[in-house]
Amino acid sequence: MTHATTSTTPRPGTTPAPVGRLLVQVCLLSTVLLLVATLLAIVAGWPAQFGGPGDPDDVAAEFLTRGTALSPPALPLALFAGAALLARRRGAAGVVATVVLMLLGVVFVVGGLGEAAAPATADVPALALTASGGAAALLGVAVLVLGALALRERGGRRGTRRV
């Protein structure tokens, strides 16, 4: 009797683990939402406030180095997206990518709490800072938890192959 391949069969070289898939999906969806938030902040003129008020006339340029009131800087965001794509891989690449996601999760918690605690200015409403900062902190915690579970799941799968 032969078994048909279904659409749920993982591609070779990718992780079929449910928690690993959920981690990747959460990170990729978050990346899209953060890019939309970046555009919104640029259009609204809402610069980052964590570490001191930014320049509302130069939000797009400051996004590269400081982020916006609603999103992290460009480099961590790009690393987040890249690591999310690589976290699907099996082996060392997937493990390293998952650890990178977890480290960025810590950065998101710190940055989110800093942005939420930053004083509102005439340029950026307090609600925008509190909501986006709280969301970033929650995202960071979710990535940390899902990353830890995904690493545990990977270890469990590796252990079952040896038996």
Image: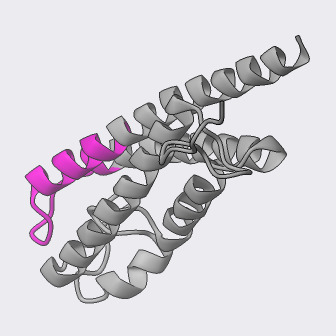
Percent across and percent down for residue 82 are 60, 63
Left or right side of 42 for 103: right
**Which colouring convention does the figure follow?**
one colour
Q: Is residue 117 visible?
A: no
Left or right side of 140 for 43: left
- 117 inside magenta stretch: yes
Percent across and percent down for residue 16 are 60, 38
- Front residue of 163/143: it is 163
Above or below 56: residue 10: above
- 104 inside magenta stretch: no
Read off the magenta span. Answer: 115-137
Percent across and percent down for residue 118 are 27, 50
Quadrant where the N terminus sits is top right
Above or below 60: residue 18: above
* Residue occupying the point 20% across, 53% down: 129
* Residue occupying the point 33% across, 70% down: 35
Above or below 62: residue 48: above
* Residue occupying the point 56% across, 48% down: 104
SS majority, magenta: helix
Left or right side of 153 for 8: left
Quadrant where the C terminus sits is top right
Q: Is residue 62 visible?
A: yes
Q: Residue furthest right?
A: 162
Q: Residue furthest top?
A: 163
* Residue occupying the point 40% across, 80% down: 62
Name the quadrant containing residue 80: bottom right
Name the quadrant containing residue 42: bottom left
Percent across and percent down for residue 36 are 26, 70
